[in-house]
Amino acid sequence: MPDASGIVGFGSSIGLRQVSGSSRWPLTSLLLLQFSSSEFLLSVLTFSWFTCLSLFSESLPVLLLKAWFSNF
């Protein structure tokens, strides 16, 4: 996965112009172009789910994250 400088370089190289007809969410469009793999989208959804879950419980997401990353 490229670092943040790669994302900034990619965004500036196309001039942050309108991408895929979406002018409301240019950053989302850029990220989807930069990381079009299903693994990245799965990790974003998983992170969002754990973030929402942590609002209700603090110990359960930690245990689930440890179990998730122990598989890799």
Image (spheres, rainbow, N blue to C red):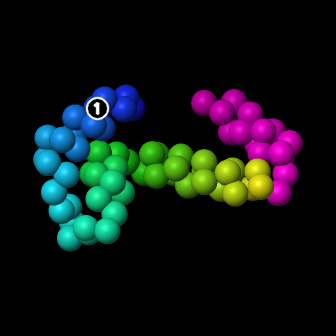
Helix, strand or loop: magenta stretch? helix
Residue drawn at point x = 77 percent, y = 55 percent:
55
| Horizontal arrangement in the rendering, residue 65 relative to residue 33 (left or right) | right
Residue drawn at point x = 20 percent, y = 61 percent:
19
Residue 29 in view in this figure: no
Give the residues in magenta.
Answer: 56-72
Mark 1 crowd level (few <14, some 14–19, many ≥20, 10 Å Cα): few
Magenta-colored stretch includes residue 69: yes
In the rendered image, residue 25, in percent from the top left (x then y), is placed at: 34, 63
Q: Which residue is mark 1?
A: 6
In the rendered image, residue 37, in percent from the top left (x then y), is placed at: 37, 48
In the rendered image, residue 8, in percent from the top left (x then y), is placed at: 27, 37
Amino acid type of the residue tagged 1 in the rendering: Gly
Magenta-colored stretch includes residue 40: no
Residue 54 in view in this figure: yes
**Does 34 appear above or below 6?**
below
In the rendered image, the quadrant that contains the C terminus is: top right
**Does 25 appear above or below 3?**
below
Say which of 72 and 17 sits in front: 17
In the rendered image, the quadrant that contains the N terminus is: top left
